[in-house]
Image: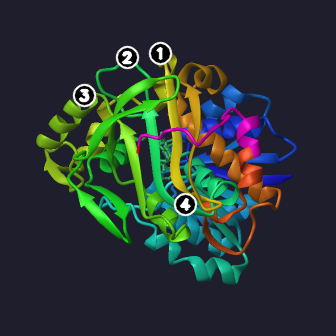
Amino acid sequence: MGKVLVIGAGGVGTVVVHKMAGLPEVFSEILLASRTKSKCDDIAAQIGGNRVQTAQVDADNVPELVELINSYQPDLVVNVALPYQDLTIMDACLETGVSYLDTANYEPKDEAKFEYKWQWAYQEKFKEAGLTAILGCGFDPGVTSVFTAYAAKHHFDEMQYLDIVDCNAGDHGKAFATNFNPEINIREVTQKGKYWENGQWVVTEPHEIHKALNYPEIGPKESYVIYHEELESLVKNFPTLKRARFWMTFGQEYLTHLRVIQNIGMAGIEPVMYNGVEIVPIQFLKAVLPNPGDLGENYKGWTSIGCRIKGLKDGKEKTYYVYNNCSHEVAYKETGTQAVSYTTGVPCMIGAMMYLQGTWKKPGVFNVEEFNPDPFMEQLNQHGLPWVELHDVHLEM
Ligand code: NDP
């Protein structure tokens, strides 16, 4: 039984709180706080039954966070605001003596850089305080990292090649929309590609490497090598990996819109003056794009995300593929959000459960693959994200 403070009332926050509310034996009390309190109130009303309390907080402001945490006294703070708030929330957790969990690594607002260095630098502080910080507990990072740890523990003596494959074969009926926060999403997919090979990072132009990959129940989809943050911690924690890549599917229409957005400067993160007001182009773009949280109603189709791994077991070559397929329609029926928010929110709830039950609890800052994957894998099957394993099949890698 534990008391949890969830910060951020977007698509992911909606799913996290829905799922927590259904498990009173684990999450005895829930406070949902965000910049716009009315969004928290809407989610709490949807869930009903007074299960969720709400509050307003500016998570960029450490004293405000400290005041809220001190007044509520949670056992864990779950950060599903934006990556920009990771460090302020970690600072507030240290000041108030509360453990921390998030789904995305810190990113400075003025630099599109996805790196763990800022959060890993908190390792000694969390250790000394006897607090746990669990980093990247969504689907990717999150489940993909746990899938990799599970493969290493049960199926390989030496993992050599890892391809994380992320397919969204859903159709939301809009000309262009992003599946999670547009600012973060566009910053992520327009950066240079990067993958790990033979002990070093190989950098590519954005979307330079691509091919059609087959996804279970979906078929072939053009997939692109992009940089994704879990690669950084996975190659550190599984040093036998000779190559680690991340593939994501994009439709032609999406890429065309993205190219135009970039070419006309709307993906810019530097402020510009407009009618005497300073605006950041990508933040303005976010204001006019569809809200990812509202895409669910007409979203049809599946996501399929998994890990394809090659390596050695008992001196022989082995291939292994573990994945989850999630239906946008089923996710919407259950929580009112699409599958991308759902596949992020469910693992986030499970990570919080692991902490509160004492299964994933140790002093310091950890990526999820550093914990025991087994109880987490079990919970995925029980809370809407069942996974499938394929052994020794031909893998397109
Ligand atoms: P949304 O933009 O839908 O929601 C973000 C929420 O955070 C909003 O409620 C927003 O408030 C709130 N927020 C923003 N800034 C502040 C602040 N300074 N203080 C308090 N609250 C704030 O994002 P998503 O729900 O789509 O994503 C949430 C997180 O999940 C992101 O960090 C994203 O990167 C991560 N993610 C991780 C994935 C994974 O698999 N690991 C996949 C998808 C997302 P307001 O409404 O007022 O703007």
Return the mark for residue 159. Answer: 4
Q: Quarter-wise, where is residue 92 in the image?
A: bottom right
Q: Secondary structure at mark 4?
A: strand
The magenta stretch spans residue 328:
no
Q: Amino acid at mark 3?
A: Gln
The answer to whether residue 38 shows anywhere in this view is no
Mark 4, Cα crowd under 10 Å, few <14 / some 14-19 / many 20+, is many
Magenta stretch in the rendered image: 378-396
Coloration mode? rainbow
The answer to whether residue 269 shows anywhere in this view is yes
* Distance from Cα at disc 2 to Cα at disc 4: 40 Å
**Which numbered disc, 2 or 3, marks the residue closer to the eye?**
3
Q: Amino acid at mark 4?
A: Met
Position in image of residue 17 (x %, y %): 67, 39
Q: In the image, is 264 to the left or to the right of 75?
A: left
Asked if the residues shown at circle 2 and circle 4 are in contact, with their CB atoms under 8 angstroms apart, the answer is no
Q: Nearer the viewer, residue 156 or 34?
A: 156
Image quadrant occupied by the C terminus: top left
Q: Amino acid at mark 1?
A: Asn
Comes first in the chain, label 2 or label 3:
2
Going 47% across and 23% down the picture, which residue do you hit?
A: 218
Q: Quarter-wise, where is residue 393 in the image?
A: top right
**Which numbered disc, 4 or 1, marks the residue closer to the eye?**
4
The residue under label 1 is: 298
